[in-house]
Image: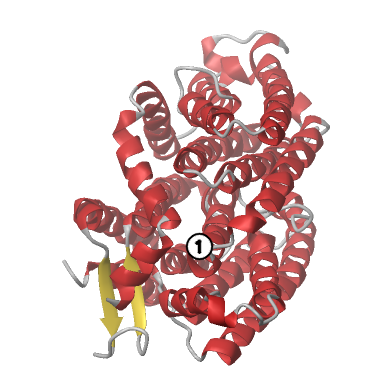
Amino acid sequence: MVNYPVLLIAVPLGLAFAIPLVALFWKAGAKWIPPVALGFNLVVSLLLLPKVFENPVIVSIGGWQPPFCINLVAGPVGVLFSAIIALVGLLVSIYALDYIKEGATEKYHTLYLLLLTGATGVVLTGDIFNLFVFFEILCISSYALVAYLRDRAGIESAVKYLIQGAVGSSLLLIGIGLLYGQFGTLNMADIAEKITSARAPALREQSPIFLFVPMVLLITGLGVEAAIFPLNAWLPDAHSSAPSSISAILSGIAIEVGLYAVARVIFTIFGAQSFLLFLALLGILTLLVGEMCAFSQNNIKRMLAYSSIGQIGLILFALAIGTSYGVTGGLFQLVSHTLSKALLFLAAGYMIYRVGSMEISALEGMGRKMPLTCLAFTIGAFSLVGLPPFIGFPSKFLIVQAALATQEAFLYVLIALALLGTVIEAGYFFRVVQVLYFKGPKVNNSGRTEAPVTALIPMFIFVVLIVVVGIYPKLVTDVLNSAASELLNRLDYIRSVLG
């Protein structure tokens, strides 16, 4: 089991490059490789979960010991994220079996698997330079997939995304270079230990700017992919132009991985508790901007994209509370958003395909034409709003509870603003539900044009997960508590990696 984390990266990476070779001999078989690879990763991640509750699984590459080697750290946080990436990636890859028909489909499936391999590498690596490398794999694959349809809107959106992503990557690389120049190491645990030593009383006369500058560069660079305001201009265009299966991954996986990296930098590397208040303010600002922009949209995919910005703001706020309750609530909301938003984009994808338009007004009466697909969309919407018995209710309730438990008046004000954002969110989602079910001419059963089975199966699984975890949140809270403890207990992380 000690080498399982390596397999989580090596197997999908190898199979990604095998897809073009398979397509040469069996073109129809190439599209089945991503489900196989991601199914493998899901099984391995679930096998690892019980093990990492006891002790993180540390893999040292090349026979050297940390900090002199490239290493993988499979703790509760990393394995939780790798399981989520594999689960959502598997379901979306099944959806894409029939949904992706245009263009060179083997290129789509190769890039798709590379994107998820990069995301898995980001959450498992213990080396900050390799975090950058895996992050670049994720981003470059995303740029290409946004432009996959090769239409004007897609290419324009991909170029905007690429330019902003390149700026973010440059800032990230500069920040890594500054850290390496000061501490002579790229291992995250070793950097964290040296930063802790640099804060010792004998060294307090040093200027804090030598830590502040690289921290800001890292957070800003990663914040572009995490879609934190004001670094989120790329997201609405990219999500609305990409195929809906890719929109689901960008919104459900890519931006969450960016937020994971921000949390790892803040909590693990720098232990920057004094920076959390600023992040809480930034989270609420991101939430309100995203929700208000979503409210004004007539394009359903742009509405969902702006909604993702709002959700990222809420997760960032919860993480910035900095308590065990707050971080657990933030991770719970991340899981909730991943499942719900992936479901929403998948359902919207076939509704758009049937009507030939992304305008919300064009979806009038679709609840009667595509009852199962629209029911899935409605459940995803209600979950994001935070209605019981769906997963969004316990996640948002835990965040409110965490903010109130701090007994700080300032956080009371911020949580009130977060709840205002939820009211705005409810307004635009209820408007879409009204259009689906209560507008447009009535149709008989012969007018139904339901999504194919390969789309309904993953949507049904998402619905089941949303409802079951919403009713029994205990199914995931133990894992989330362990993940929160790993992020907050910085010294334990350092000891587990360095010994």
User: For the N terminus, which image quadrant?
Assistant: bottom left
Residue at the far left in the pictured view: 1
Q: Residue 164: horizontal and vertical position, in percent?
A: 75, 68
Relative height, residue 98 to residue 497 (above, below)? above
Relative height, residue 472 to residue 459 (above, below)? above
Seen at 74% across and 35% down, the residue is 291
Q: Residue 454: horizontal and vertical position, in percent?
A: 40, 40
Q: Residue 58: horizontal and vertical position, in percent?
A: 27, 72
Relative height, residue 97 to residue 133 (above, below)? above
299 with respect to 177 (left or right): right
Q: How many marks?
A: 1
193 with respect to 15 (left or right): right
User: For the C terminus, which image quadrant?
Assistant: bottom left
Viewer-closest of 45 and 52: 52
Viewer-closest of 87 and 189: 189
Seen at 42% across and 29% down, the residue is 466
Q: Amino acid at mark 1?
A: Arg
| Residue marked by disc 1 | 264
**Residue 102 appears in the picture as rendered:** no
* Picture quadrant where residue 57 is located: bottom left
* Picture quadrant where residue 297 is located: top right
Seen at 42% across and 34% down, the residue is 462
Q: Residue 467: horizontal and vertical position, in percent?
A: 40, 24
**Residue 217 appears in the picture as rendered:** yes
